[in-house]
Image (tube, rainbow, N blue to C red):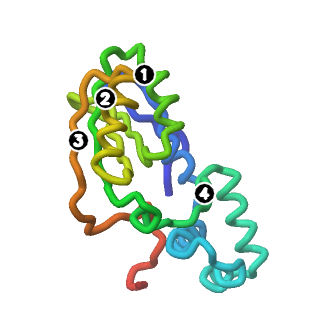
Amino acid sequence: MFEKNVVLSIEGEMMSTPTISMVKAADFLDMKALSLLMSNGRASWAELGQHLRLSAPSAADRVHKLEERGIIRGYAALVDPAAVGYSLTAYIAVSLGSHRQRAAFLRAIANMDQVSECHHVAGEDDYLLKVRCRGTQDLDHLLARELKEKLGVARTRTTIVLSTAKESVRVPIAGAKKSGEK
């Protein structure tokens, strides 16, 4: 299905691709299990076994192996941010003053509950953050005090989300469905 030693070359530098190496040994039943668990993370072993046409213990073994290999990283409740007081979503493009600030920036971001995602990006900015705030004052404090004053971020560009048409934690799973299966 996948080659064993897949390596990506970008501008002459060789980089391994862990997502491909993790998936290489996963088979059709693993993909089908992942697909179900992303839709219903609380599915019982019996439900999963029935979906996979395996016994409940065999289904559980498959999931435990996926966890051990790091393909399944964990489980969590999906909470409505507005219901718990965080109705404002924004994306913040961040440019650091110096790349020597990177480690301190990443340590600080990891401890900020308002930052739900942090991506190192290509282009004129260094990072793209997805944040959840209580409102514009909360966002202003995050930008001015936490990012610029405390961390010395050189520049930010903020986009406030007006409404969300789709938001998902699902990952596309190639090969999880047989042709003709819904």
User: Residue at 29% across / 39% down in the picture?
Assistant: 140
Residue 62 percent coordinates (x, y): 69, 66
- Identity of the amino acid at label 1? Arg
Pointer 2 or 4: first along the chain:
4
Q: Secondary structure at mark 2?
A: loop
Residue 112 falls left or right of residue 127: right
Residue at which label 1 appears: 102
**Nearer the observer, disc 4 or disc 1?**
1
- Identity of the amino acid at label 3? Thr
Task: Say above or below: 50 vs 151.
Answer: below
Residue at which label 2 appears: 126
- Identity of the amino acid at label 4? Ile
Residue 89 falls left or right of residue 34: left
- Would you say the residues marked 2 and 1 are in contact, meaning their CB atoms lie under 8 Å apart? yes
Q: Quadrant of residue 124?
A: top left
Residue 79 percent coordinates (x, y): 49, 66
- Would you say the residues marked 1 and 3 are in contact, meaning their CB atoms lie under 8 Å apart? no
Pointer 1 or 3: first along the chain:
1
- Would you say the residues marked 2 and 4 are in contact, meaning their CB atoms lie under 8 Å apart? no
Pointer 4 or 3: first along the chain:
4
In this rendered view, identify the residue nearer to me: 76 or 13: 76
Q: CA distance from mark 1 to mark 3?
A: 20 Å
